[in-house]
Amino acid sequence: MCRGRMLAEVLRRGQAACARQCYRGSLVKRVLLFTMEGNADGEAALAFFQSRGAAVDVRDVGRDPEASAEVFRLAGRLAVPTIVIEDRLFLGFGGHREEIAALVRE
C-alpha cells in the first residue's frame, strides 16, 4: 500500500504505478506533484495528499528532464514543489495549504 511511504521510495518506485495500485477504481482528485528527493515541502505535500486519499502523480525534477521542462513551461521557472490540481497551479505547499485542502475536499 502506498500510504505512508517516504518520498524517496515513491520516486524510486515510480508514483504512477503506485497511484494505480492505491486508487484504481476510486473517484478521487488527481494531483500532479513536481518535487525532488530531499525536498521537505514536497514530502509534506505528498503525505498531506495521501492522507486525504488524493491520487498523486509524483514527478522528480531532479532526475527527469521532461518533468523539469514541464514545470518551467507551466510556471515560468523551476520551483519545488509545484502542485497542479485540476486547472490550479501552486508554487510551494506550506503557504497554500488551506487553499489546497479546500480543493481536495471538493
Image (cartoon, grey):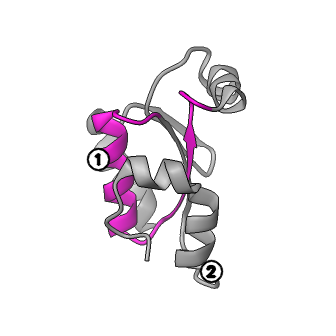
Residue at screen point 68% across, 26% down? 65
Residue 49 in the image: state x and y as whole percent: 39, 59
Please name whichever residue, 62 or 28, is drawn nearer the observer in this view of the structure: 62
Badge 2 is on which residue?
A: 24
Please name whichever residue, 24 or 52, is drawn nearer the observer in this view of the structure: 24
Tell me the quarter of the picture where residue 24 sits. Answer: bottom right
Q: Amino acid at mark 2?
A: Arg
**Number of other residues with Cα within 10 Å of mark 2, as a class: few under 14, some 14 to 19, many 20 or more:** few
Please name whichever residue, 35 or 63, is drawn nearer the observer in this view of the structure: 63
Badge 1 is on which residue?
A: 44
Q: Which type of secondary structure does the marked residue at label 1 adopt?
A: helix
Tell me the quarter of the picture where residue 40 sits. Answer: top left
Tell me where the magenta segment starts and ends, as one range: 36-63
Q: Which type of secondary structure does the marked residue at label 2 adopt?
A: loop
Locate residue 18 relative to residue 49 in the image: left or right: right
Please tell me whether residue 58 belongs to the stretch shown in magenta: yes
Please tell me whether residue 19 belongs to the stretch shown in magenta: no
**Label located before the other in sequence (2 or 1):** 2
Distance CA(mark 2)–CA(mark 1): 23 Å
